Image (spheres, rainbow, N blue to C red):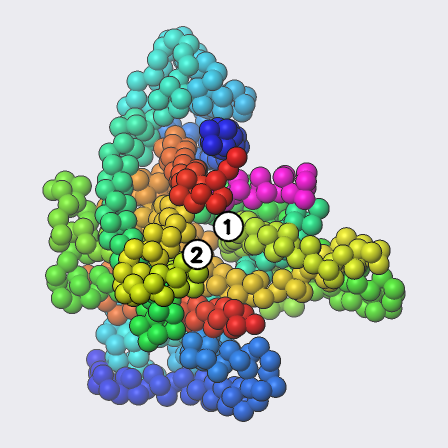
Amino acid sequence: MLAFFLRRLGVMAMTMLCLTFVVFYLVNLEPNLRKLAISQTEMHASDEHIESWLTRNGYRRSFLERYAAWIGIWPKKPNIDPETSKQVSRFTYCEEPSVVVYAGVIEGDFGCSTKFKTKVADKLLPALRATGLLMFWVMVTMVPVALFLGILSGMREGSKLDRSISVISIATTSTPEYVSGVVLTIIFGTWLGWLNGSAASATGDGITFYNFTLPVITPAIYGMGYIARMTRASMVEVMTAQYIRTARLKGLGFYAVVLKHALRNALIAPFTVIMLQFPWLLTGVVIVEVMFRYQGFGLALVEAAGNNDIDLMLSCSLVSVLLVLVTQLISDVGYAFLNPRIRVQ
Amino acid sequence: MEFMSPFSIVLRVVIQFTPVWIAMAVLLTISLLFKRRLGLYGFIIETGNGFAGVSILSFWLFTAIFATYVAPFDPLGQIVSMKDALPGAIESNSGLPYLLGGDKLARDVFSRMVFGSRIVLIIAPLATFLALSVGIMLGLPAGYFGKRVDAILSFLANLILAFPIILLFYLLVSPGILETPIPYALAGLFFVFPIVLLFTLFWSGYRAHPKQLALRLVLTLLAGGWLFATFVFDSDPFHILRVSPSTLNIFAAVALASGPGIFRIVRSLTLDIKTREYVQAAQTRGETPWFIMLWEILPNARGPLIVDACLRIGYTTILIGALGYFGLGMPPESPDWGTAIKESSRLMRAFVHPALPPALAMMSFVLGLNLLADALREQSLKD
C-alpha cells in the first residue's frame, strides 16, 4: 500500500513538472511579455524601451533558468537598474529581495500580481478561502441529494419512481451552470425577488442565505444528475447480488436489506465519482463566480487571464493542477482502501 | 410601438416553425412506419426516452437546415428603434414582430436563436468527430500493442486529463496566443488524424484490390484537402465555410479536452476485445496489426463508442457554450447560444427576455442528446 502510494506521488510530481512547464511556456509567450512591458512603461514606448524593460527585469534570461527560478530550485538574481546600478523591483507595489536568493513557489514566493497590484499570495489566499467555502456548500447540498435520489431510483430498477428520477437526472446533467444560473436568477432574483442575483456582497458582509443560495445551487444542479446516475447504476448492480437475495430469503424486510446490506456496498463506486467531481466543479465554480461576481479563485483566474497578469496566472494554474492531481490521488487510494477486492499489492 | 398579445406570440412562434414541423412529421412518421426494418434506430425510437431524444434533435436539425425560412430577420441586423424591445413588439417598417423581443444591440432574439442552432449544430458534432478520430487512432495501438506504446500514450493522456479544462481554454483560446503559430500547429496536427485514420482504414482493408483502394484514397485525399484548406488555412475553395483562427482554436481546444477521455475508452475496449477468438483467428491468418485493429476490433467496439459519442456531443456543446460565455473563440456578434447567453446575462436585472431563449435552446438540445444516449445504452444493455 505504501509503495503504491509513493509511486503515485512520484507520477504526480512528474505530471506536475510537465504541466507547469507547458503553462509557463504558454503564459510567457512573446506577445504576452511585450504586452506586459507596454503596460508597465509609457503608452508610446519604443521598441528599445520595451526591450530594455524586459532585459532589466529578467524576462530575457534563458527560459529554463527562469522556469527553474520560478519553481525555486535555481537562485533568483535581483534586477539591477543599469543607470543607477541599484536593485529595483519589477513592479512598484511589490518589494523584491536585493540579494541572490532561492525565491520560487517552493519557498512560498508566488510573485506579483499586476492586475490587483499586490503580492499574489495576498490575493490568492483569501480568494481560495472564499472558493473553498463555496465548494464546501456545493458539496454539502449536492452529494446527499444525489446519493438519496440514486439509491431511491436504484433500489427498484424499472419502477415508475426509477424512471421519473432518471429523467430528472438526465435533465439536470443537460443544464450547464451558465444556463441554470440564468434561469434561476430570472425566476428567483428578478421575478420573485427572494434571492440575490449577485454574490458581490458576500465578500464584505459575509455570506447569507439571500446572497449565497443561487451560487451554491447553480453548480450543484449540474453535478447532481451525474452522481445520482452513477449511484443508481451501482445500486442496481448490488441489488442483483447473491447476498441481497439471501438476505431477502432469510426474511428480512426490504428496507432493512437496502439500508443494512445494499447501501454500504453501493456507495463505494460513487466515492470515486464524487472525488473526481472536484476538478469538474472547478470549471463550474469559475462560471458561477463570474456570473455572480463572487470574489473567489475563479474570478481571480479569469481576471488574470483577461489582464495578462503573468504571475497570478501561473499561480492559479499551479493551484488548479494541484487540485486535480490531489483529488485523483485521494480517489485512487481511497477506492483501494474501501474496496478490498482491488487492494494493491 | 405596437405589441402582440402573449397568446398570439406563442401562436406566431409555432407558425414560424412550420417547415420544421412538416419535416419532423415526415421523418417521425416514416421512422415509426418502418421501425422493424431500421435495426437499432427502430428499437430506439420505440422507447419513450429515445423518441423524445430523436424528436428534440430532429427539431434542432431541421431548424438549422431551414433557418433562413424560420427566422424573420437577419441575426446580425440591427433596427435601432427595436433596442431592448419587449417580446411581441412590431417593427414598423416591415410590419413583422420581434417575436421574443430585441437585445441591447437591437437585434431580433428569435432570429438569433434560430441561426445560433446552425453554428452549434456544425461545430459541436464536428469537434466531437475530430476528438473521436484522435482518440481512436491513438487508443487502438495503445491497447493492442501495449508495453512502451501504451506507457507513453497513457502518460500523455493522463497529463492532459490533469489539466483543468477551464485553464486549458484560457491558455489556448486567449488573444495573445493567436499571434503565435501554436493554434495552427495544434489544429493542423489534429485535423491530420481523421485523414490518417481513413487512409489506414482503406490501406489495410483494400490492399488486395488496387482499383477500389485507389478510388477510396483519392476520395479521402480530396475530402481531407478540403477539410485542411477550409479549417486550418481558412481558404475554402468553394466558399461554403469561413473559419476564423479563433474558431479554429475551439476545435483544437475541444479535441485536446475530449481526446484523452475517448482514448481511455478505446484503449480499455481494445484490451478487452483483443483476447477474443476472432482476433486470434485473424492473427493466425497473418493479417497486419492495423487490419486487425481497424477491421476486427473497431467494429466490435462500436456499441459503447456510439453511446459515448452521443453523450460527448452534448458535453462538447456545453463546453463550446462555456467558451462563448467567457467570450473566447467566437466573434462577439456571433449568434451562437453561449455568446448570446453571455451578452444578455449582463443586463439581466433590467431585461430578462434576451437571456431565456438561448438558455432554453441550449438546454433542450443537450437534453435531446442525453435522452438519446440513455436510450442507446438501455438498448445495448439488453443485447
- The residue carrying mark 1 is B257
Q: Is residue B192 visible?
A: no
Above or below, B45 against A137 in this view is below
Q: Give the SS element for disc 2.
A: helix
Apparent side of residue A123 relative to residue A157 in the rendered image (left or right): left
- The residue carrying mark 2 is B319
Residue located 56% across and 63% down the image: B304
Task: Compare residues A285 and B44 and report the one nearer the observer.
Answer: B44
User: Sequence order check: which comes first, mark 2 or mark 1?
Assistant: 1
Label 2 is placed on what type of residue?
Leu
**Disc 2 to disc 1, C-alpha distance:** 9 Å
Label 1 is placed on what type of residue?
Ala
* Residue interval drawn in magenta: B146-162
Quarter placement of the N terminus of chain B: bottom left
Residue located 33% across and 76% down the image: A160
Q: Chain of mark 2?
A: B
- Please provide percent x and percent y for residue B163: 47, 42
Residue located 56% across and 72% down the image: B383
Neighbourhood count class around disc 1 (C-alpha, 10 Å): few under 14, some 14–19, many 20 upward: many
Task: Compare residues B254 and A1 and report the one nearer the observer.
Answer: A1
Q: Are marks 2 and 1 in contact (CB under 8 Å)?
A: yes
Q: Main secondary structure of the magenta part?
A: helix
- Please provide percent x and percent y for residue A332: 45, 41
